[in-house]
Image: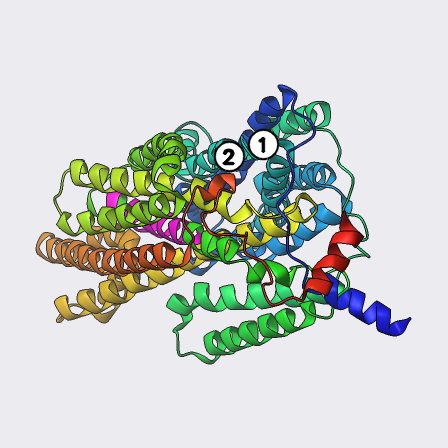
Amino acid sequence: MSEQQTNADSAKESAPLAPPGAAEDLSPRRWLVLAVLCLVVTVVEVDATVVNVALPSMAVELSASSSDLAWVNDSYILTFAALMLIGGRLGDQFGHKRLLMGSLGLFGIASLLCTLASNTEQLVAWRALLGIGGAGILPASLALVTVSFPKSERPKAIGILSAMTVLGLPLGPVLGGWLLNHFWWGSVFLINLPMVAFALIATQLLIKAEAPEQGAGGLDLLGVALSTLGTGALLYAVIEGPHKGWGSPITLGAGILGVALLAAFAASQRQAKAPVLDLRLMRMRVFVVGSLATALSFFVFSGIMFVLTQYLQGVLGYRPLNAGLGLVPLAVLFTLSSVVAAPLAARIGSRAVIAIGLMLVGVGMLILLGADESSSYGIVAVSLSFTGFGAGLNVGQAIAASLSEIPAQLAGVASGASHWVRQSAGALGIAILGSVLASVYSDKVRSSLGGLPDKTVDQTADSIGAVEQVASSLGTEQAGKVVGAAHTAFVDGMHTAMITGAVLSFLSAAVVFTLLPKGNLAKGEREDAEPEAASDESPEARESVASGTS
């Protein structure tokens, strides 16, 4: 009997992930469900960027240092990305609707606590709690779309949800800038409450509770701990590297610890009865490559907004609201190309559409090499248009393709893994492109301001945001020198960061076009013989699995 059980377990481990069947509920209500989920994911993504324009106000009201402000921003990213895998698994364990409603409730409570924070320590803690709520909301939303729509409609539905996800990123600075023109800094969090309340009511009324995954066998607590701590440690190293130094013991220690914990996590998943991450997903070429292609777009999105917000305000002198409005072409062109992507994929195939999108993203970043200290907004708009249009071609098709062969009972695990990769890539985009920018900026400033007092040079080299305050304390001649050197140094750093992002985009386009199979993958139409699975499994194993799962 033990031998039979061993064979059955082996067969289960090597079982192919059969494509899910069409959704059972084809009522028109599924489009209302999609509308609610679009609102939900938009609120979450807005919160990821809305705080950027509020940081100066927080610095005054809460007497916050630059390090404090960095953690106000980063604490949300850390918990958001680190817990994304867990969110997907919890949805499979307890039901995606339950996870969504619980996470929305937590998100609303954390938003209220943020508005009531009286110091930066409290605000950092409540922002981390916001990230925990968001980590449950996003995978639950994508999983509900996956199981609510038939395969023929799923690419369109996922494309719409993806468009709203990206729309929330530039909408954050716009909404935050408008609120700060009329209210206090806490209003950027208080705005979440009515939207969360509406989403909770609509979710309860419109979304049907689905049965949890059968035979899940509980939660893999060891996997939860290893994945959370490993991702958190690794992101801590990446985020803190520019501030503490990449060679500092803290940065290196956190990075090594993160890699070691994630390696232990991967090893533990082979033995877990209810793994956080089903390792069969990692053997699916379409899932892996599609997730990586989407991750690159989020890497670029997060990085380019981080850089351009500073460029528009610190170099070109835009007010926060105007700087936020300046990012609108990114969202508009993304939405437009998301509509175009599906019919285009039907003609030339998903891999061509995704690769073209990645190349356009790279072109958009290279266009910014023409921007300087006195450029008009036009060159920024053209750059964002290329970047947004390219990402719109890529993201929706890549997400739909990556999930096209995932069974409905593993939708939460797959969507959680997909979101985890994308959000981690977004954090890496800020950290890596921001680090490239900061390094070039600091070196250029220090080499250009020789002869000025060390304190003046240090303050100027710290960030472009400090330049105006430094210049106001100097004479006219020295102030002009400081401002000119800072603006030139920032533009040089921005150019270097954009070249870095463009090279990654072009390389990713080549990888996607080489590794993805031909066909309209978003609709599960492959031109090769069979959907990719564990090709080395035996016929006996496949027969055993088929008889046990059909």
Res. 451 image quadrant: bottom left
Q: Which mark is residue 20?
A: none
- Point 44% across, 66% down: residue: 238
* Outermost residue toward the top in this view: 28
Give the magenta part as a residue range: 295-312
- Point 78% across, 66% down: residue: 9
Tell whether label 2 touches label 1 (CB within 8 Å).
yes
Label 1 crowd (10 A; few <14 / some 14-19 / many >=20): many
Q: Tell me the kind of residue under disc 2.
A: Leu
Q: Position of residue 504 (x, y in %)?
A: 31, 59
Relative to 105, 502 lies left or right: left
Q: Position of residue 124 (x, y in %)?
A: 56, 53
Q: Position of residue 328 (x, y in %)?
A: 33, 33
Q: Is residue 169 above or below residue 64?
A: above
Could you tell me how many numbered marks the image carries? Answer: 2
Res. 284 image quadrant: bottom right
Res. 519 image quadrant: top left
Relative to 444, 253 lies left or right: right
Q: Which mark is residue 37?
A: 1
- Point 47% across, 78% down: residue: 252
* Outermost residue toward the left in this view: 477
Q: Quadrant of the N terminus?
A: bottom right
Q: Tell me the kind of residue under disc 1.
A: Leu
Give the main secondary structure, helix, strand or loop, of the magenta stretch. helix
Q: Is residue 91 above or below residue 199?
A: below
Q: Position of residue 286 (x, y in %)?
A: 49, 53
Q: Which mark is residue 161?
A: 2
Q: Is residue 404 magenta?
A: no
Please state which of residues 382 and 63 is positioned toward the viewer in this rendering.
382
